């Protein structure tokens, strides 16, 4: 088995932790050495030598590439190499806007408490300030902090939703809940004058995705989130290479690539009324305690 040297393009490897399968060479302090994967055979006849898409090659090596101001990081969907996410978490804490995977489609995210980052996310995605954005949460504790929580029943026949909803999380659902005072106020501009208003409701997601959860855990707080779609379109962009090509020139700071997603968004459930109502059916299956809204028109920017 041969060895391949991968350079880090400006990222200090001493600031990164290394798994047991990766060793630092004392002779090459700015590189790391990893085993080459054995070549696959095509139809049992010859070694695969097919040409790769030039755009995909652009982001495939080195693993950390900083071109045109964009940091592109490839990670395994299983989350086995989450050490690669340390630069991403650092960027997010410094106010970056970037793209990460979820258990549905890719999402553009930024720090929940950074108003300047949220405004930049809106400009990049061309989202009006009046349109609410959902948040990605790591745990039920986050949900309890930034919302008033799930209905717990009144002992007179109403469903204790909190008890049953725990079986859906983490998972491909967006639950719209009453917001708590801990949720940062939303900036609504009147011309050039910023105005801040408390949000009455918020859509929360707890994705069942190892990479997304690793980022949220290291952040220690939720992230503002909106799904990645084609500019001025209603279709999701599912390939991280295409996302980098489309949104890189628009000003995003990074892309975390964890494979191509499937075009199946989250199921959106409104929990602010007397009963849970599905306002958009997506990847999450309908539960017995949910009802379906006849007009599936959601104004929440969710993924």
Image: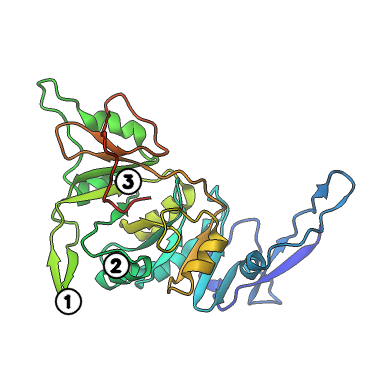
Residue placed under numbered mark 2 in the picture = 118
Describe residue 263's horizontal placement relative to residue 133 as left or right. right
Give the Cα separation between the discs numbered 1 and 3: 37 Å
Describe residue 133's horizontal placement relative to residue 53 as left or right. left
Q: Which of the marked residues, 1 or 2, is nearer the chain's N terminus?
A: 2
Q: Is residue 156 visible?
A: yes
Residue placed under numbered mark 3 in the picture = 139
In the image, residue 108 above or below residue 119: above
Foreground disc of the pair 1, 3? 1
Foreground disc of the pair 1, 2? 1
Q: Which mark is residue 255?
A: none
Which residue lies most toward the top here? 157
Quarter of the picture containing the N terminus is bottom right
Between 218 and 45, the residue placed more toward the observer is 45
Measured as percent of width and height from the top left, residue 33 is found at 70, 66
Residue placed under numbered mark 1 in the picture = 191
Measured as percent of width and height from the top left, residue 170 is found at 38, 40
> Label 2: how many residues lie within 10 Å, few (<14), some (14-19) or many (20+)?
many
> Label 3: how many residues lie within 10 Å, few (<14), some (14-19) or many (20+)?
some
Could you say which quadrant of the image residue 14 lies in? bottom right
């Amino acid at each position: 088995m041969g060895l391949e040297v991968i350079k880090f393009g400006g990222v200090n490897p001493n600031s990164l932790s290394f798994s047991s399968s990766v060793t630092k060479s004392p002779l090459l302090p700015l590189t790391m050495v990893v085993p080459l994967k054995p070549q696959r055979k095509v139809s049992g006849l010859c070694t695969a030598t097919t040409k790769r898409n030039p755009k995909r090659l652009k982001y495939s090596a080195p693993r950390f590439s900083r071109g045109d101001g964009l940091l592109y990081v490839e990670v395994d969907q299983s989350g086995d190499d989450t050490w690669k996410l340390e630069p991403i978490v650092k960027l997010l804490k410094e106010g970056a806007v970037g793209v990460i995977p979820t258990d549905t489609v890719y999402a553009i995210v930024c720090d929940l408490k950074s108003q300047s980052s949220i405004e930049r996310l809106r400009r990049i995605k061309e989202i009006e300030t009046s349109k609410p954005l959902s948040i990605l949460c790591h745990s039920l504790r986050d949900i309890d902090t930034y919302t008033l929580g799930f209905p717990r029943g009144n002992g007179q026949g109403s469903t204790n939703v909190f008890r049953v909803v725990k079986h859906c999380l983490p998972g491909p659902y967006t639950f719209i809940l009453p917001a708590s005072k801990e949720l940062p106020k939303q900036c609504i501009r009147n011309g050039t004058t910023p105005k801040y208003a408390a949000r009455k409701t918020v859509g929360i997601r707890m994705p069942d995705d190892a990479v997304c959860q690793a980022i949220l855990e290291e952040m220690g707080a939720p992230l503002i989130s909106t799904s990645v779609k084609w500019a001025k379109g209603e279709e999701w962009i599912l390939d991280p290479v295409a996302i980098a090509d489309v949104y890189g020139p628009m000003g995003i700071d990074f892309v975390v690539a964890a494979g191509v997603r499937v075009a199946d968004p989250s199921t959106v459930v409104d929990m602010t009324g007397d009963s849970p109502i599905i306002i958009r059916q997506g990847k999450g299956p309908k539960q017995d305690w949910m009802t379906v809204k006849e007009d599936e028109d959601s104004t929440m920017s969710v993924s």
